[in-house]
Amino acid sequence: MNISIVIPTYRNEKGLVEYLKRNMSHFAGCEVIVVNDDPKTSVLGAMSDFPEVTLIENKKNMGFSGAVNTGVNAAINDYVFLCNDDVLLKDAQFTSLISQFKKDEHLFAISLKQIEKDGSPVGKNIICWKDGFVQHSKADDISSGINGWAEGGASLIDAAKFRGLGGFDELYGPFYWEDIDLSYRAWKKGYVILFTSEVEVEHHHETTINKHFSKNHITAIAYRNQLIFIWKNISSLSLIISHTFALLKRIIRSILTGDIAFLSGFVQAAIRFPFILFKRLSVPHNVTDHEILNQFTKN
């Protein structure tokens, strides 16, 4: 089949087993790799019902980025299907997407249509520059086409290109923005990211994260990683200047209004600034920020 399935998991043994039981028939012919990112609790016993699955148990918690990277680096096939442990497949139609990669050597990834708990479809996204910050949101148009980023929970990716870009940046650990960052670097390299509405999976976003982290902590991490993304990836001088003034205003406003989440996120990002500068050195520059961002306009 030439596809490896990479499933990161963290303290979700019951859900992992449930979804594997329902998905394994659709994974027929594929290599299946489960990466357990909880070093304190082994899932080896739970995996006894799935002898065909390769289990990797991290000796330390590496976050979503590190867990996925571990799985992709262990994969033997040319294409990797990133599948969260709470994603339910309807069929094996995702395997047909290989043909699109063979037609376009610049294709980096294809995101799948994901159905939320309320029945709404997601998976097609836009990124834009607004008020001095990179913003992201769901696209209004859910038809097949270019995509802002390939979501880490349900995407088929060219494994060689993934590794060539260095995979997910673990600076974003434990979660959020790592898939946007990788995809942005892919766009900057000159690769293409698509969304398909023809392949559907069921995926209730954030259910696992909300079980283990407080709302304030999640918000602070989201702000931190938004800043890391901008400081690492944006190279346009006009955008950098715009961000600098906007950031100063946002800091002052946050102090006056007591927005602890943003201030915490800013401090956490600032502490990592030397590492961010180092990471900037490996960001491709084949395509400009404006060329990328101008592709995505909210309908």
Image (spheres, grey):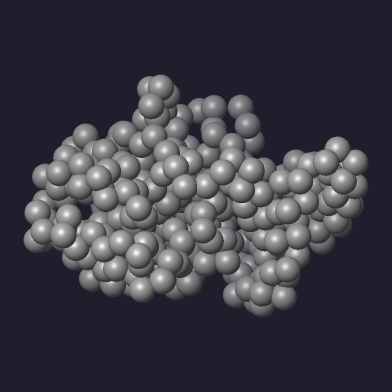
**Residue 217 left/right relative to 78:** right
Residue at 37% across, 30% down = 115
Give residue 158's quadrant in the image: bottom left
Whole-percent x and y of residue 248?
88, 52
Whole-percent x and y of residue 123?
44, 38
**Residue 202 left/right relative to 247:** left
Viewer can see residue 9: yes
**Looking at the figure, which quarter contains the N terminus?**
bottom left
Viewer can see residue 110: no
Whole-percent x and y of residue 16?
25, 48
**Residue 7 left/right relative to 297:** left
**Looking at the figure, which quarter contains the C terminus?**
top right
Name the one closer to the observer, 50 or 99.
Answer: 50
Name the one closer to the observer, 238 or 279.
Answer: 279
Q: How many marks?
A: 0
Residue at 27% across, 50% down = 13
Residue at 44% across, 73% down = 164
Name the one closer to the observer, 42 or 138.
Answer: 42
Whole-percent x and y of residue 214?
56, 43
